[in-house]
Image: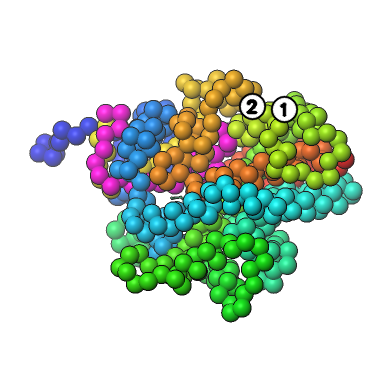
Amino acid sequence: KKFKTSKLNHPPGPRKLPIIGNLHNLEGLPHKCLQNLSKIYGPVMKLHFGFVPIVIISSKQAAEEVLKTHDLDCCSRPETVATKKISYNFKDIGFAPYGEEWRSLRKLAVMELLNLKKLNSFRYIREEENDLFVKKLSEASVKHFPVNLTKALFTLIASIVCRLAFGQNLHESEFIDEDGMEELASRSEKLQGEFAFSNYFPGGWIVDRITGQSKNLEGLFSELDGFFNQVLDEHLKPGRIVLESPDVVDVMIDMMNKQGEDGHFQLTTDHIKGVISDIFLAGVNTSATTILWAMTELIKNPSVMKKVQEEVRTVLGEKKEKITEQDLNQLSYFKLVIKETFRLHPTAPLLVPRETMSPIKIQGYDILKKNQIMINVYAIARDPKTWENPDEFKPERFADSCIDYRGLNFELLPFGSGRRICPGMTMGIAMVELGLLNLLYFFDWVLPEGTTVKDIDMDEEGALIIGKKVPLELVPTRQH
Ligand code: HEM
């Protein structure tokens, strides 16, 4: 031990046990448990999940050092059994290590998903799908029955994402069951977060085989793979007619067919499936869950609900039959409600884990090469040193503040920051804003008979993307 003592200043952390490291310290949801541990060990702490060293960042200052000062040094991704599977052997954007392949795919995604011109030209898809959503909710409102908003919102967002990115109209699709979207999305979330021994222990694959974990993973994956294959096959059909503008899959197939053999990175069908998988997994759960949390908080806080509905209905007038994205420009309190939802309920509370590519120093601590880094944006957004009454849902806190959630203010990072920032941010925000606006403009919402605000369950579940555990059921009454 004496000889091994180095001059390195390692981050503090709870005592680890032989073999399991700190796995025994993890109880409940990781972001909450790590938030509690950081109150003891500080904003930069080191834990070991089995044999894997993981550095947890829980303050605005430390997050800025990682994501701004050292962004390039730590913008790779660690490999896990599940992410290898779901990314078609890292041939995607979200889980691919840093390198030429990731850069090329990411560039393509930014062009297709972040491109404002393209997003605007697809505006009508979002508006049409929301219109249909309002019609369905209006039918339910006649009967005054509770609506399962969780399911309804997953279907809405999946319809937009599948139409916009894959050219698939879920309402007419022969092979996709639109009502099964919530289940498919939550299965995929399970797949990403499955605990596997092989992630943390050398030879852990043997345990995974014995416990049936490997088989479980295979089963979940083959269901999703079936869906992604169908999307790809539809696009590869000879004589395919592109009705709307070419979607992401069309663009990638075109690139694949035109590429020469010049030694550069070659696009394959696995890359296309990797990107389809990314868009579906990263796009649907996150946006639907954000609207769901916004509605949950509004029902729990009736004065905020009243204020935002008053603004929405006064500014847009009483007689609108259809909401457009232009209507969003005139709303200010509404936008604060969304900001506050992103603060209290970041859907990826630990972002997507990163991996250091070279040794770095964060807040004076030495972090070695190939260490995992998790940024606890949940803990940062509820840090009482930065936020007054951090657990309260209070959109007014942003009224005179220029803090935004687009990756430049390190106290509020629902989309991450730096090179790995979410490339679907603009699309995600557009879907969340329009979906919530339709819910608030056209309907009044109450809890089902016999339940009160105290009965609203705020429990969370999930692994990488955290959702609401119990579905939200509310009774709509059509207003206009
Ligand atoms: C409200 C909606 C959304 C939220 C809150 C969200 C959040 C995030 C977060 C936190 C990350 C990780 C960033 C990091 O590691 O620093 C991420 C990555 C990613 N997101 Fe999103 N996202 C949303 C919507 C979307 C949509 C609609 C798409 C695609 C259609 C998308 C595609 C991706 C991809 C491909 C990555 C991986 C980027 C990379 O590793 O280079 N996201 N997202």
In the rendered image, residue 280, in percent from the top left (x then y), is placed at: 56, 57
In the rendered image, residue 44, in percent from the top left (x then y), is placed at: 35, 32
Q: Residue at point 44% right, 71% down?
A: 258
Q: Residue at point 9% right, 39% down?
A: 3
Q: Amino acid at mark 2?
A: Pro
Picture quarter containing residue 74? Answer: top left
Residue 304: which numbered mark, if any?
1
Q: Residue at point 54% right, 31% down?
A: 404
In the rendered image, residue 67, in percent from the top left (x then y), is placed at: 38, 37
Looking at the image, residue 120 lies above or below residue 342:
below
Q: Which residue is mark 2?
A: 395
Relative placement, left or right, of 50 versus 467 is left
The magenta segment is: 342-364
Please say if the residues under marks 2 and 1 sit with CB atoms less than 8 Å apart: yes
The answer to if 353 sits in the magenta stretch is yes
In the rendered image, residue 53, in percent from the top left (x then y), is placed at: 31, 45
